[in-house]
Image: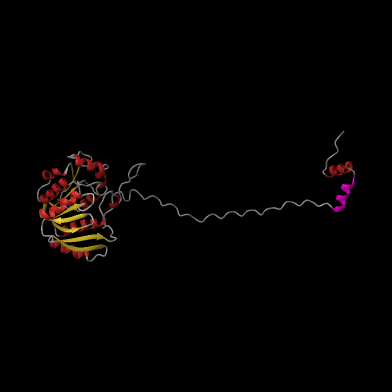
Amino acid sequence: MTVAPGMTRPPRELADVPGWFPVLDQMLFTWFLDRQEARETRGDLLEVGVYMGRSAILLGHHRQEGEQYTVCDLFEGDAPDDANRAEANKSYSRLTRQIFEENYLSFHDELPRVLQGPSSILPDEVEPRSCRFVHIDGSHLYEHVYGDIGAAHDVLLPEGIVVLDDFRSEHTPGVSMAAWEAVLNRGLRPICLSTQKLYGTWDDPEPVQEELLAMLRERDDCHLSVQQAAGRRIIRLKSKGMSAPPFPHSRHYEEIPDPAPEPAPGPAPTPAPRPAPTSPRPRPRRSRARRLAVDLLPPVVTRAIRRARAGGHPRGA
């Protein structure tokens, strides 16, 4: 595939897809989903808010035979209210459904089920108790996040996992309020906290927490702390030079070669030797006697002698 001038280069690696999906969360998504699959847990996948598709591409890689993967986003569509419209214009003005779909199809053979619209449509579009994993990364406004958490509660299967993005970012207080309200008043049980996301369940978190702690204690690339808050065990994680988990290359990986590296500078050419300067031919020195003779002769004779030496002839009268 050739990239035309002015065209965006198709992604070759997951990291080439624009977005906010730190390697710590890539590792945790992979671990939770692999754990479910190892336990033969079946269920659909749901993501609310996809941006350019980085986390969606990873989630789609874990869709098993017979499962459905649904994504929901406004894309370039109309927001349901003025506050949501202002948020979309400020943070997601470059997002279009076409860009998301092109990025996703760089890694997968087919698209997920795409719902274009506000997340309030989810109760009518996703079956109750049908999902094993839900990622909420849509609006940052309290009212919308409150509704998204309620929708996640209704669609999750027993032992299902919900992930809330931006639960503690300084610019998203609405997410923080909705997330901790769900913990304190709506039965959500935290499993762990990454730098950016809260992982939780509405079931007993202890079994998955014990397995998670055992895995983390074998790693040396993750800061780990365990705290108690309001009677709940909180596992806090922070990357310590962590590398992203292995992930398949996109289908563009071999089609678009990397730009040829600039040739290494060779040794400077040796300058050609400059010719040695030639000395001017020395003028023949006249003897002192001849100089005296010329000086003492009459001027007419002296001029005749000089013309004769130069090979000239006397001018005619």
Q: In this view, does 117 lie above or below 32?
A: above
User: In the depicted view, which residue is nearer to us: 304 or 223?
Assistant: 223
Which secondary structure is most common in the magenta stretch?
helix
Q: In which quarter of the image is the C terminus?
A: top right
User: In the depicted view, which residue is nearer to us: 205 or 139?
Assistant: 139
Rendered image coloring scheme? secondary structure
- Does the rendering let one see residue 158? no
Start-end of magenta stretch: 287-297
Is residue 2 found left or right of 50 in the rendered image? right
Residue at 10% over, 57% down: 203
Is residue 70 found left or right of 261 in the rendered image? left
- Residue 289 within the segment the image draws in magenta: yes
Residue at 16% over, 52% down: 179
Percent position of residue 287, x then y: 85, 53
Is residue 309 found left or right of 170 in the rendered image? right
Residue at the farthest top position:
317
- Residue 273 within the segment the image draws in magenta: no
Residue at 85% over, 53% down: 288
- Does the rendering let one see residue 303? yes
Image mark count: 0
Percent position of residue 46, x then y: 16, 49
Percent position of residue 214, x then y: 19, 65
Percent position of residue 1, x then y: 33, 45
User: In the depicted view, which residue is nearer to us: 5 or 67?
Assistant: 5
